[in-house]
Image (cartoon, helix red, strand yellow):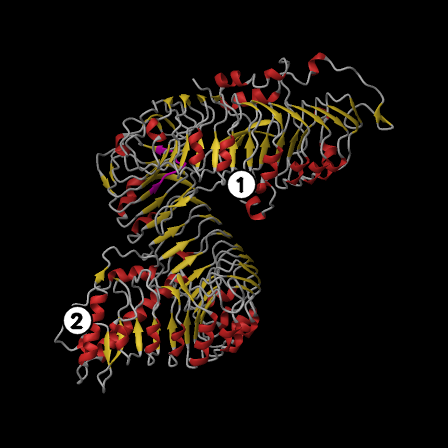
Amino acid sequence: MGYSMLLVLRVMLCLHMFMMFHFACLSSHSCHPDESSALLHFKTELNNFDEHFSCDHYAECLCLHADPKTRAWQNGTDCCSWMGVTCHSVSGHVIGLDLSCRRFVGNIDPNSTLFKLTHLHTLNLAYNHFYGSQLSSQFGQLVSLTHLNLSHCWFEGDIPSQISHLSKLQSLDLSWNYALSLKETTWKRLLQNTTSLREVVLDDTDMSSIECGFEGPIPSSFFNLTHLASLILRVNAFNGSIPSSISNLQHLTHLDLSGKELSGSIPSSLSNLHGLVYLDLSGNIELSGLIPSSFSNLHHLVYLDLSSSNLSGQIPNMFDRLTNLKTLFLWGNNFEGKLPSSLFTLTQLSVLDCSENKIEGSLPDKVAFSNLTHLILHDNLLNGTIPWWVLSFKSLRSLDLSNNRFTGHINEITSYSLEYLDLCNNKLQGNVPESIFDLVNLSNLCLSQHNWNDTVHFSLFSKLQKLSHLSLSGCNSLALGSETSVNYTFSNLQALQLRSNNIIGYSTFSGNFSDLEFLELSNSKLEGKIPQWIHDLDSLHHLILSNNLLTSMGQFSWYQLEDLDLSFNLMDDDISSFFCNATLLSDINLSHNRFIGTFPQCLANSSTPEVLDLQMNKLHGNLPDTLNSLELFALILNCNQFKGLLPKSLSNSMYLLELNLGNNQFEDTFPYWLQNISVLEILILQGNKLYGPIANLKSENMFQSLIVFDISCNNISGLLPKAYITNFQAMKIVDDEVLSSDYYIDTGFHLGGDGIIEVEKDHSMTSIIKGVSTTFSKIPGDFVNIDLSGNKFEGEIPDVIGELHILKYLNLSHNRLVGHIPHSLGNLANLESLDLSSNMLTGNIPTELTNLNFLEVLNLSQNQLVGPIPRGKQFDTFSNDSYEGNMGLCGLPLSIQCNNNVPLQQDPPSEAEDKFGFGWKPVAIGYACGMVLGIGLGFCVFSIGKPQWLVIIFGGKRRSHGNRRARITLFQLMVVM
């Protein structure tokens, strides 16, 4: 927000300069003919007005409202009266030219007549599109220039050395010319010659050759410009610490070092810049430590932005001396403790954003704020009731207290200027306050995830005709339909989220949503066929009806849909021609239904789907070998009845992150051709009829992104794929940020601009974890799994597995592996489950395995292991089941004692303990994919030996997983009939 405000100020300054120039030109002197001619020729050079001007920045978008034409520039008229032209009051020479925000396109060539205006003092061409133009060396001829603004002009190439000839420059703005670079020699000459330079703005300009080079520290030469009043270096790739020599710039009023890679702590020397009015250090994620309490010396500070960094500790109680502060951004840090009391004494404060921290405690009962327009405190640990003052500011436009721990009732709301109100995800109670329906300026409203006691009548929200985004979830009773035949109008509503409600009158609702683009009614006990009023939403782009009891789609009518989620319903439509007229669909989730038919040929030929999830249905037949969408990110078809060969055309989907074809009837060799997809992260082919050895890799860089590799319950033979495992680079790198994330694939999005609606378009996954068939409604962020069980692999376990340091689940059971258990497995510090059962492993259990502090499940049963069972740490928690069928083992927890590291007794194995019997895993997979499919899958390891019994191994103690929100079911029974 701070960045946008600064850009707005720049545009306003441009407009102010224009007005000043316009009135200044009203003098008694006429324009010089040669300068008038030069201006007219320059106009023709830039006569290509850009009707399709696209704005990348907020201030640039404001230019869309500026008058783009220069109608008054006509031959025979006084150029001093032209828009954007300023003439000297005595000599009549053109001294100012402001063509900013004119939306011109074209080139400024070296022979341009612009360079004949040699008396120019001020030149502003900002926010035009000179695509690909070189910054001409002829700018150096304009030696009288004091102010030069060429920002957002799309110049490219080197900044010419002749720019250093502009010795009178006081202000230089070359920002946001992405392909423009500044050489060191040019920069040094400029500094030597421009001793009056007071403002330097070089945002997002390539300064790679200055001093220490690209991504080096901020050049010390900046801090020799002792007359500087404004230094703006936003979004340059400088790193390192903020130099303490910055305190040399005693005249500095504006300092912007945001969006870089600066590190270390904020130097206290910044507080010596007593004249600072504007300070922005945001977006430096490597900054750490505390806010210096000496910042209290910055008495003139009006704008302070320290957001999106890594600052921590308590916010210092220093604000009683910052009486001029109007804007404060501290969001996106690690601040903790209570908000300082002095913060609430700032009478001038207009914007306060401390969101996304760890701030706790309650808000005070009284504050001195009188001009507050934006109060943003979401995603903290704030508690208590919401004070009356929060909801009563007459000037308040935005209020966001979402994702905190506020309790109690919502008081009457009298902030009638509110446009944005988000109270979602707290612990508020009672009724929805009627005063909300008097907030006629509201455009965004979120009241989700509360225990509303009364019946909420949806029709009341039609009073808020400016409403564009509405999220209302968790209602005990939401009356969507009406007993009357009134047709309610929601003329501006773009997004409607009614998740997890008890909806009344869903099928009889009557309403007019002329602009509705997003609709979510998930988990709301909806039944039967999708009603006509939803089919009539012509503007719909996103439809989410998951987790209901819907039985039929009806006639598919949303041809403009981009996202469709009907997962976890009872749909039994034929899927074959379901999507053929919806050419824009990019995200399709029809999983966990009863859809029938073959794979839609129109989808196979389409290039638009990005995510396609059809798992847990009754689809059958071969997959067409035309699945070559270049935009495909995820293809999830597990637990159907597909057969035949795997489609090799998938090798062309170069952005494919997840491929899950498990629990079908594919009969093919291992798809080695997938190694062409370097970004593939999840590969699940379990429970098919794959056979033969795994082919060798063609490149050392293949499969380097994999974190889930599951080919269990097939007929794959040969040695374990050592070369593949060696290439699993993503499993070797310990990334605390990834390991601590909630979910692995985050496909959530916010709908539209400042819209409140938040959507998590996640898909489920079923896998055998710790001996149990587990269905994840969302894939945990730390899910790293290798499952090669239930095949015919031979040979030894390669030591290289011990290099996969973030591996959590390893299952090599029910194969024909021999040799010793590698000692290197003791390096798998994050391992929670290890299953090597039903093989022919020999030797001792390595004592290094006791180093696995997170190990919850261990299954070494049905092997030929010998010697004492290691003791200590997690090994003291495992039961007999972890070791049964190894007649050479001794020691606790077995009843067989050791004598000189050998068992005192050895009983012959019973026939029932045949390690190649009917195992636990096939039955578990059967439950996961339905009774009918499960019976067939139950024999996935039958070729290993004759079926005997079901053994499910539970071992170790379950440890808490903190705030994991993924819903886990032990066995999910889906009867596919």
Determine which quarter of the picture holds residue 813. Answer: top right
Magenta stretch bounds = 496-503
Q: Nearer the viewer, residue 50 or 702?
A: 702
Query: In the orientation shown, which residue stands out farthest toward the right?
Result: 900
Location of mark 2 (residue): 73
Q: Is residue 498 magenta?
A: yes
Residue 445: % across, % down: 35, 48
The mark nearer the N terminus, 1 or 2, is 2
Query: As shown in the figure, which amino acid type bears the numbered disc 2?
Result: Trp
Residue 858 located left or right of residue 738:
right
Report the magenta stretch's main SS: loop
Q: Nearer the viewer, residue 146 or 409?
A: 146
Residue 219: % across, % down: 52, 70
Quarter occupied by the N terminus: bottom left
- Residue 223 shows up from this direction: yes
Residue 479 located left or right of residue 200:
left
- Tell me which residue sits at (53%, 32%) in the image: 968
**Considering the numbered disc 2 on the image, is that residue within a helix, a strand or a loop?**
loop
Location of mark 1 (residue): 705
How crowded pointer 2 is (Cα within 10 Å; few <14, some 14-19, many 20+) is rated as: some
Residue 531: % across, % down: 28, 29
Query: As shown in the figure, which amino acid type bears the numbered disc 1?
Result: Ser
Quarter occupied by the C terminus: top left
Q: Is residue 159 magenta?
A: no
